[in-house]
Image (cartoon, rainbow, N blue to C red):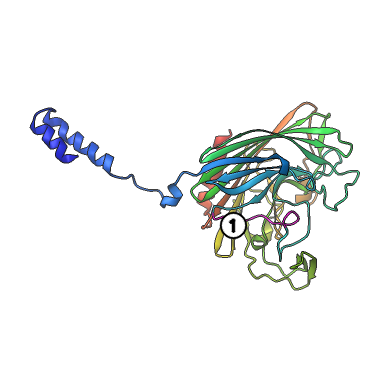
Amino acid sequence: MKSLILLIASKRIFPAALIPAMLWLSFSCNSSAPKSGTEQNDAIVAVTFVKQESQHKVDVLMDGKLFTSYCWPDSVYKPVLYPVLNAAGVEITRGYPLQPRIGERSDHRHQVGIWLNYGNVNGYDFWGNGAEGERQVKLGAIKHLAVETTEGGDGEGTLRAKASWVDSSGRELIAESSTYHFIAEGTTRIIDRISVLTATGGKVDFPDTKEGFLGMRVARQLELPSDEEVTLLDAQGVPTKIKALPNEGVTGNYRSSEAVTGPDVWGTRARWMALYGSIGDEKVSVVICDHPGNINYPTYWHARGYGLFAANPFGVKDFTKGKDSLNYSLPAGQSVTFRYRFVISSAQQLTDEAINGYADAFAKRYE
């Protein structure tokens, strides 16, 4: 390119004063811009969807590999994201009860994948629905109605779905419209869930309870080490009680935006909560970010060492041991919006600075 420019200049096709600019252009066109990370981190990841209505699910693929599925199993009584895998293909959610794995807990069968519901809605329990295998009079259910749209793209895909919160008689209390943004940034995976709840069956009360609200149940390896008695699944899938809890491979630990760690995070308030650990040789960070536009921001955390990782803005009375209360009510015909972000990092443990960056970007994106 340089020799061509000199040749043209020697024949006085262009003024000599333009030659420096032409040489700069030649250098720019033949030089690569500085990389912010590895080639893998900079690669654009295609997000696509595969609808499988007969199997009650829509698979979310990133570069053709399963990231998660939006699904509505009959036995779960709510739509969930399950399973959830990191960029390396490592499953970070518990398999039980849908796909039990040896050595994992068999408790709280209603805690599946990632979900959003609450333990007391006009007296109906939407949190523990399906916990005992048989429906009880005061248990509610969230009925999947339709996947309205899916839109794939480079680096991000969007799924919109409708659901109905019904009481034990099938009467609708709440109409739900949720939008899921599935985002890939290098080896980091992000899920933004924006859910609009509308009181269609009259006024809806959310009396304070710790059993809520946005929840996730993680793999055994991401639990916190403990010496408690526990029931684990054996090789035949039979629940077996173990008195001395084996902690081999159990590596999880919580840390909040307020620098609270371990089991002490339960019942505290924070703009985000991180769960760190390793699954085999794979380092994993799972973060949930609250949004400034949500009720009672920053949220309380119903985060337990046994693998339950949940944000709950409504459980004030339980979290403060009766010192305070909220008892939120949604007037008939009115709507309320909830926004939450999951950040799932592969091959590294995120720093507070990095997490604050994700939380700030989340707050700004959905102002």
Say what secondary structure mark 1 lies in: loop
Residue 138 in the figure: left or right of residue 332? right
Residue 193 point in image, percent of width and height: 64, 40
Question: Residue at the spot x=11%, y=32% of the render?
Answer: 9
Location of residue 20 by image quarter: top left
Q: Main secondary structure of the magenta part?
A: loop
Give the residue pinned by disc 1: 90
- Mark 1 Cα within 10 Å, few/some/many (few <14, many 20+)? some
Location of residue 308 by image quarter: bottom right
Q: Quadrant of the N terminus?
A: top left
Q: Which residues are magenta?
A: 88-99
Q: Is residue 35 above or below residue 337?
A: below
Q: Is residue 291 above or below residue 113?
A: above
Question: Magenta includes 296?
Answer: no
Question: Residue at the spot x=80%, y=69% of the render?
Answer: 241
Q: Residue furthest right?
A: 137
